[in-house]
Image: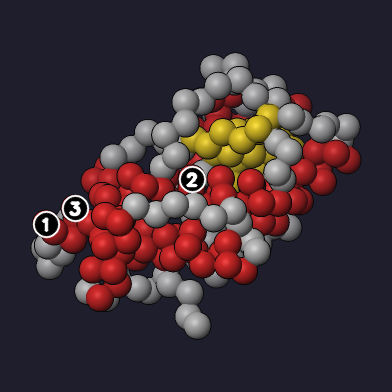
């Protein structure tokens, strides 16, 4: 933990952390989509849920971005697939979508890939990093409105996730940046609007004022 980050700021971060998670109970679905990012835990958790029998088919979606190119030089989805195979998911159960550069493309390109392979799922489990659940849900509701969507992520507390990343300031910046996107993207037609409780908005305002803003959209 960073010594210069106050207890109040951590509480604000935990408030936003909790808001980002949808609280869905994972349940059997037609297909799962692992959303690419810097977080290999997405693939780990996807493999765990596959072994539990929650879905027969898994799509990993994601190309490269400036924040993941060094970590995953062959692309996010390719590295996710390799990790899932190492954890025992059979090759026949995985499809790989390697072109997506944002969350909307994760949904639309995965849906197209599934259709190309003869799949028209009625239900989908979106597996993401923990603080991306709500944005993934809102995006899917907009671009794939007919599908029954459930969200899941590794069951980590905020402090555990900070330890796994190793940079508390960066994690808080990412929480703030994702919340800004949850608010702003519906205005641009990219996602379905989400209610934001007043305590979450207040925590966001305090953290932005305190300088936790490196991952925010610049107007």
Q: Residue 116 in the image: x percent, y percent?
A: 88, 40
Decide if residue 167 is on the left or right side of residue 53: left
Residues 177 and 91: in front is 177
First in sequence: mark 2 or mark 3?
3
Q: Secondary structure at mark 2?
A: helix
The residue pinned by badge 1 equals 7
Residues 148 and 198: in front is 198
Q: Which mark is residue 200?
A: none
Residue 91 visible: no
Q: Secondary structure at mark 3?
A: helix
Which residue is rendered at x = 70% and y = 51% of the image?
Answer: 143
Q: Residues within 10 Å of mark 1 (few under 14, many from 20)?
A: few
Q: Residue 106 in the image: x percent, y percent?
A: 67, 51
Q: Residues within 10 Å of mark 3 (few under 14, many from 20)?
A: few
Q: Which mark is residue 133?
A: 2
Gap in angstroms between the C-alphas marked 1 and 3: 6 Å
The residue pinned by badge 3 equals 11
Q: Secondary structure at mark 1?
A: helix
The N terminus, quarter of image: bottom left
């Amino acid at each position: 933990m960073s010594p210069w980050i106050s207890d109040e700021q951590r509480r604000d971060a935990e408030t936003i952390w909790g808001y980002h998670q949808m609280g869905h109970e994972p349940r059997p679905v037609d297909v799962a989509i692992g959303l690419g990012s810097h977080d290999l835990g997405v693939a780990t958790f996807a493999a765990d849920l596959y072994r539990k029998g929650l879905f027969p088919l898994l799509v990993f979606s994601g190309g490269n971005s400036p924040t993941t190119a060094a970590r995953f030089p062959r692309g996010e989805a390719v590295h996710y697939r390799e990790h899932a195979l190492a954890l025992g998911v059979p090759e026949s159960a995985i499809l790989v979508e390697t072109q997506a550069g944002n969350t909307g493309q994760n949904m639309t390109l995965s849906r197209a890939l599934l259709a190309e392979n003869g799949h028209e799922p009625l239900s989908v489990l979106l597996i993401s990093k923990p603080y991306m659940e709500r944005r993934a849900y809102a995006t899917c509701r907009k671009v794939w409105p007919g599908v029954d969507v459930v969200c899941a992520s590794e069951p980590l507390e905020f402090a555990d996730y900070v330890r796994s990343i190793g940079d508390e300031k960066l994690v808080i910046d990412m929480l703030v940046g994702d919340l800004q996107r949850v608010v702003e993207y519906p205005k641009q037609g990219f996602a379905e609007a989400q209610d934001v409780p007043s305590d979450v908005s207040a925590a966001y305002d305090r953290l932005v004022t305190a300088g936790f803003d490196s991952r925010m959209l610049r107007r």
